[in-house]
Image: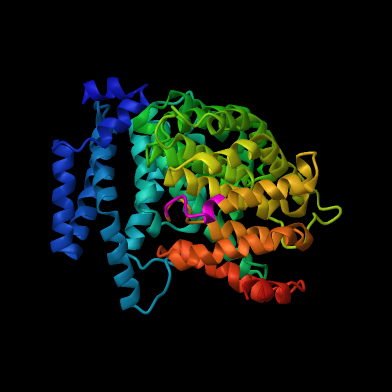
């Protein structure tokens, strides 16, 4: 309606809120009716919907030629109907292909079949709604939404063109419906384009990429700067209605940014607002997790890791140092985010970074930074807290620090290595002592196992008898599966110690 067009034109939050409103409007009722008809009479309903969509689109084109005001509303409603039955269309198209012995959806579509008709509709979206001189922002936004819904029937060539249109649609100067439609399309299109690029790479004899999303990087690279600028602007305008979609879009784009070279230039503009969203919505299972996912995607890029740590560490350490009085789940969230930063992903075995491996060295430097800033309050938290969720997050972080830091961790505090070993053993002994419940000490065995695996044998030797006795006593009384399995892993590791300590371990056990 004219009232909706005025309200939605510059307000993405109002547009998304009204689009996802669950009250029974005429549109919602129509969508439910189409879905019910497709469930009961899938083939005939899908064919009828396609007939109606093609007919209404032709009528809209004629109305536009005659200069009829609001001609685009007829086409927009037709595209909405096509998108609402997209899953059923994909199922019907698959049945048609299987009936003719075909496979996949990238070959030549049979004339008159569902796939051919949908692809013809998609071509018209590109020609008339996204690139034509008569483009309307509401119609263009609906076209991108429809493209994301009809993705399973789209050809690879069409996907590439829609990707370019979606990237262009994020620009901050455009109307809200178009920007929201662009985000919805990007979330679906980028994985699809990446998978197609990865398949083409394998078909040419190349290796399968570890991250299929990264395979889309070559096509996305020229558009990344403007894409980040538009998404940052949209994030700053977002309220609860749009945060989930915008954060999910940023996360997918960051994963496609191979090496993080482009996003590193926008890190402060991205990380600061996302951290603010995370702090505000940390207890929200949807938005809080989305924000954490963006920060995790940034941390996965070595180029972003150190600047990101400098951006977020002060706030996270304040939370861990003063856990009382924090909002619900804030302490656990801060510990989980610190664990993301402390993951030296490319480190494998050994006690030091391979010489010349700059990426591993950069990651290890951030692990050291996390330990230096948060190590002492973290161990104080383990030694004082009786909150099971806080304890589990704290134990996971300490395990990660030991796993990533290995023997270097013992020298980071600047004092004698024995002091750090004593602090770690003190944490383990509290968890093994029985003073805490099983849920609060669930990772006690895992912490001891990490210490045995990562630290020099001679550093732990003075504490071996004490730790082993505590492990055995705790195991006798334990019932909870995570606790029991961790303690058994400690015993198994000791018996099969390849560093020459198995005999001494058996003596202690005896």
Horizontal and vertical percent position of residue 56? 22, 44
Q: Is residue 49 above or below residue 65?
A: below
Number of callouts: 0
Residue 168 showing in the rendered view: yes
Q: Residue furthest bottom?
A: 101
* Residue at 24% from the left image edge and 27% from the top image edge: 68
Q: Is residue 62 left or right of residue 389?
A: left
Q: Is residue 404 left or right of residue 161?
A: right
In which quadrant will I find the N terminus? top left
Horizontal and vertical percent position of residue 381? 54, 39
> Is 103 covered by the magenta stretch?
no
Q: Is residue 164 above or below residue 275?
A: below
Residue 131 showing in the rendered view: no
In which quadrant will I find the C terminus? bottom right
Observer-nearest of 461 and 210: 461
> Where does the magenta region start and end?
430-437
> Is 436 covered by the magenta stretch?
yes
Magenta stretch secondary structure, dominant: loop
Horizontal and vertical percent position of residue 191? 50, 53
Observer-nearest of 23 and 388: 388
* Residue at 43% from the left image edge and 67% from the top image edge: 108
Image quarter of residue 453: bottom right
Q: Is residue 475 left or right of residue 507?
A: left
Observer-nearest of 29 and 507: 507
* Residue at 79% from the left image edge and 40% from the top image edge: 415
Horizontal and vertical percent position of residue 107? 45, 68
Observer-nearest of 396 and 346: 396
């Amino acid at each position: 309606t004219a009232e909706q067009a005025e309200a939605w034109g510059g307000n993405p939050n109002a547009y998304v809120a009204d689009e996802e409103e669950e009250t029974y409007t005429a549109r919602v009722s129509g969508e439910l009716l189409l879905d019910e008809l497709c469930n009961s009479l899938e083939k005939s309903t899908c064919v009828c919907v396609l007939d109606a969509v093609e007919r209404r689109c032709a009528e809209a084109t004629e109305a536009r030629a005659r200069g009829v005001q609001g001609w685009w509303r007829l086409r927009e409603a037709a595209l909405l109907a096509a998108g609402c039955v997209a899953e059923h269309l994909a199922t019907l198209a698959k049945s048609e292909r299987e009936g003719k012995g075909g496979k996949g959806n990238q070959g030549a579509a049979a004339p008159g079949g569902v796939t051919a008709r949908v692809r013809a509709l998609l071509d018209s979206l590109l020609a008339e709604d996204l690139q034509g001189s008569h483009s309307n922002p509401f119609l263009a936004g609906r076209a991108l939404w429809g493209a994301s819904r009809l993705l399973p029937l789209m050809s690879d060539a069409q996907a590439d063109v829609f990707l370019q249109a979606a990237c262009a649609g994020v620009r901050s100067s455009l109307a809200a419906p178009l920007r929201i439609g662009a985000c919805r399309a990007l979330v679906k299109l980028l994985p699809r384009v990446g998978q197609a690029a990865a398949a083409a790479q394998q078909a040419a004899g190349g290796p399968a990429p570890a991250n299929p999303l990264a395979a889309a990087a070559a096509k996305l690279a020229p558009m990344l700067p403007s894409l980040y600028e538009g998404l940052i602007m949209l994030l700053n305008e977002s309220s609860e209605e749009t945060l989930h979609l915008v954060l999910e879009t940023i996360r997918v784009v960051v994963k496609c940014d191979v090496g993080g070279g482009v996003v590193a230039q926008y890190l402060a503009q991205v990380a600061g607002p996302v951290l603010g969203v995370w702090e505000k919505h940390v207890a929200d299972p949807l938005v809080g997790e989305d924000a954490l996912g963006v920060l995790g995607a940034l941390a996965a890029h070595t180029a972003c890791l150190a600047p990101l740590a400098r951006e977020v560490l002060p706030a996270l350490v304040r939370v861990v140092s003063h856990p009382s009085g924090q909002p619900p789940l804030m302490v656990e969230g801060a510990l989980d985010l610190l664990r993301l930063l402390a993951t030296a992903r490319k480190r494998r075995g050994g006690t030091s970074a391979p010489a010349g491996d700059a990426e591993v060295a950069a990651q290890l430097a951030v692990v050291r930074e996390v330990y230096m800033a948060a190590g002492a309050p973290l161990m104080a938290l383990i030694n004082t807290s009786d909150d099971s969720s806080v304890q589990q997050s704290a134990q996971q972080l300490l395990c990660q620090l030991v796993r990533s830091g290995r023997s270097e961790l013992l020298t980071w505090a600047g004092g004698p290595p024995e002091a750090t070993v004593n602090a770690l053993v003190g944490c383990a002994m509290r968890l093994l002592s029985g003073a805490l419940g099983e849920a609060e000490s669930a990772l006690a065995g895992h912490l001891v196992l990490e210490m045995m695996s990562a630290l020099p044998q001679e550093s732990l030797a003075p504490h071996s008898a004490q730790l082993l006795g505590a492990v055995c006593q705790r195991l006798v009384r334990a019932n909870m599966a995570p606790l029991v399995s961790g303690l058994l892993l400690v015993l198994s590791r000791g018996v099969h110690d390849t560093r020459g300590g198995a005999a001494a371990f058996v003596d202690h056990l005896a």
